[in-house]
Image: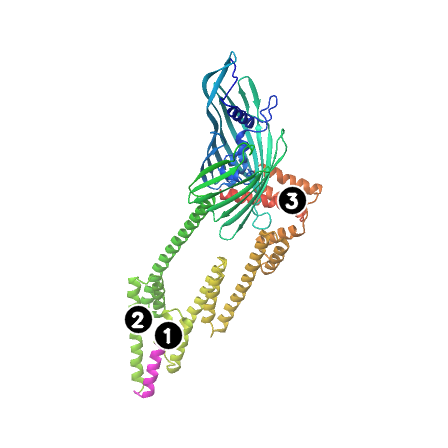
Amino acid sequence: MMLNAMKSSIFNWLLLLLIGGTLYAETREGDAGVESLFDAIGVSAKDMSMGRTAVAYPDNMGAFLWNPGGMVVIDQKCIGLSQTTIFEGTQYHFISYIHPTLTAGTFGFGIARIGLTDIQNYEYINNVPVYMGEFDYWKGKISLAYAHHLFYGLSIGLNFEANRQELGPYNTNGFGLDAGLHFHAPVQGGIFRHLYWGLNVKNLIRPRMKLGASTESLPTYYRTGFAKRFVFGNSNAWAILWDFEKHPYKDATHHIGTEFNWRGLAFLRMGMDHREFTFGGGLRWKGFQIDYGSSPTSDPGIFPRSHRFSLSLFLGKSIPDQKRAIQEAEEQKIRQQVQEREQAERRKRIQEGIQLGKQYFENNDYFNARLTFSRVLSEDADNTEAQKYLTMTKDKERVQQQEREQELRKQSAEEESQRRDKAFVREKYEEGLQALDQADFQRAIQRWEEALSRDPDNEQIKSYIEKAKVELEKEVNRLIAQANSLIRQENIAQARRVLDRARTQTENNQRLHNKVMVEIRRLDNTVNFINNYQLGRENYEKGNYKSAANFMEKALQLQPNNEQVRELYRSARARSIGVKKEMSSDVKKQFAEGLRLYSEAKYHQALAAWEKALEMDPKNIKIIESIDVVKRKIQQSEQE
C-alpha cells in the first residue's frame, strides 16, 4: 500500500507540506535544501526578537548553534529552556547548558526537538479513503560544542551535532559538524572597544539523512557578522548587531538587531529578519532571566506570528568574578604573609629591646634605658616587663636629680634667684624627658639646653643633650630610610609626611636639615618621574603613542637607567613613527627565526630573536606587534 493522504482536511495537507518544505526547502537531488528548521528560526527568544542576529555576539542559550567560537562571550554557567508554538500545534523545544572555565575554554550542550502529533493516515482502496490510524512526525538533534581562546582576542569553536528524524514507521540519523571563529579586539578605548566579529560555517561536515528510500544532506553555508556595544551610565548598554548569510541555493540575506540593556535587569529588543520586523524583551533578577520574542516564521498572510519564551538560569560566579576572587585571595595571602612577617619582626624587636634596656639600666645608663623601654612600649603598650623597668628607670633618674638638687643646696645659699633657677631647671629637665619619651629629640635638646643655661655645670643634662643629638641623627636616618621604603612602595603621600617630620626635627641642625632637604628634592624628582611614567602608560594603552613617547622621554630624563621606561619609550616612539613595510633579507631571516621559536613554545628565545630584529629595523610595526604578543604569552604562562 502507498501513503496517499496525511490529514483529513486540505489545511492539514498544507500544514504537513509546509513542515516538510520548511525543513527541506527548495529540495535538489541529493541535497536537503537550504537549511534545517532549527537554523531557520533559531533557538532562543533573544535571537528571535533581534532578527536572528547572533553570530558576532551570541550571549544566549543557543550560542553554539549561531557560532561555537563565540561561546567565549558567555562568562557564567547557564542552563537555558525555550519553547515555541510555531503553528497549529507544532511545538519546538530546546534545552541547553553552557559551561565557561577560566583556562580550559567553554563547553556547550543542547537538545532541540520539533514535532507534530496525531497525524491522521488514510489509504485509498478502490478510490475510497480508508482510515488507517494516526502517526507522529518529529525531528531532533543533540549538540556538543567547545570554544577556546587562541590569542589576541581570537577564538575558535566546533559544534558536533547528532540529528534524528522520525515519520511514522520511518526514522533516520545523521551527524554533522559546524566551525566558528570569533574576534573581540582587546583594547581599552576608541572605536574598536566592545567591537565583535564572528564567522560560522554551518555543516562543514554535512549530515546525511536517509528517510525511506531518499538520501539527502544539508548544504554547507556560512554566516558572518559584526556587533558593537556602547556602555554608558550606571551599567547601561546598547548593542547593534548585523549578520550576513550566504547559502548555495538561495539569495544572500541580511539581518539587523538591537538591544537596550538597563542595568542588566531589563532588556528591550528589535530587529529585521530579511525584511520582516521582530521584537521582544526580557527581565533578569539575580540568577534568573526570562525572555520573550516575536517573529514571523512563514507567510504572514496565512500563518500568525510565532511567539517564543526562554528561561535562563545562571549558576555560580562569572569568569570575571572568579578572576577577581582569585586575585583577592592571592592579595590576602600576601597581606597575611606580610603581617605575619611584621609581627615576627615586631616580637623580635620587643624582646631585643627589653634585653638591651636591661643592659643600659644595669650600667646606670638611664638615658638609653628610658629611651629603649619607651620604644618597646610604643610597640607593645601592655608589656609589663617594659613598664616595670621604665618605672624603675624614672625612679633612678628622679633620685639622681634629687641628689643634684641637694648638691645645689649645699653649694649655695637658699636665695630666691637660686630657687627660681632650680625650679626652672627642674621644669625644663622634665619637659625634655617628656619629649624624649615621645622621641621628639629636637624639643628635648632645646629644653635641656634651656636648663643648662641656668645650671651650666649639670653633667647629667650635658650627657643627655649629647646622647639626644646622637639619637636625633639616628631618628633622621631612620625616617629617611622609612621614606625611601615608602617611595619604593609608591606610597608617595606617606613618604612626604615622613620627610616633613624629619625636616621639623632638624630645624636647628643645619647639617641634618640639608640632608633631609636633599631627600625631599629627590622625592620631588620621583613624583615627577611617576607622573610622567603613568601618563605615558595611559597614553600608550589608549594608542596615543606620540604623547606616550613624550612623557616617557621626560621620565627617562629623571631616571635614565630605568630599563622598563626605556623599553616602553622605544616601543611608543617606534609605533608613533613606524610603518608596516617589507623587511630586508637579514631582518626577515631574524624575524622568521623568532616565528620558529614561538611555534615551538620557546617564548623567551622568540622574544630575544624579535628584539634583535627590532634593533635591525626599529620602526617596523609588525616586529613590535609580535614582541607584544610573545610578552603577553610569557606573562600568561608565568601566571598559570
Q: Is residue 130 shown in magenta?
A: no
Residue indicated by mark 3 = 622
- Which of label 2 and label 3 is nearer to you? 3
Can you tell which quarter of the image residue 81 is in? top left
**Residue 195 sits in quarter:** top right
Tag 1 secondary structure:
helix
Query: Which circle's residue, 3 or 1, is located before the other in the chain?
Result: 1
Q: Nearer the viewer, residue 64 or 486?
A: 64
Q: Is 413 rendered above or below residue 197?
A: below
**Majority secondary structure in the magenta region:** helix
Whichever of labels 2 and 3 marks the residue nearer the N terminus, that label is: 2
In contact (CB < 8 Å): disc 1 and disc 2: no
Residue that badge 2 annotates: 394
For the rendered model, the colour scheme is rainbow
| Place of residue 372 in the rendered image (x, y in percent of width and height, measured from the top left) | 36, 65
Three-letter residue code for mark 2 = Lys
Question: Crowding at label 2, few (<14), some or many (≥20) Cα neighbours within 10 Å?
Answer: some
Q: Residue furthest top?
A: 126
Residue at figure coordinates x 64%, y 53% from the top left: 573
Q: Residues within 10 Å of mark 3 (few under 14, many from 20)?
A: some
Q: Amino acid at mark 1?
A: Gly
The residue mark sitting in front, 1 or 2, is 1
**Vertically, is 433 above or below 25?**
below
Image location of residue 349, percent across then percent down: 37, 59
Circle 3 or circle 1, nearest the eye? 3
> Where are the magenta residues, as a range?
413-429
Residue 427 screen position, x and y as percent: 34, 78
Q: Is residue 418 magenta?
A: yes
Residues at badges 3 and 1 in contact (C-beta under 8 Å)? no
Measured Cα–Cα span from mark 3 to mark 1:
70 Å
Q: Which mark is residue 432?
A: 1
The amino acid type found where label 3 is placed reads Lys
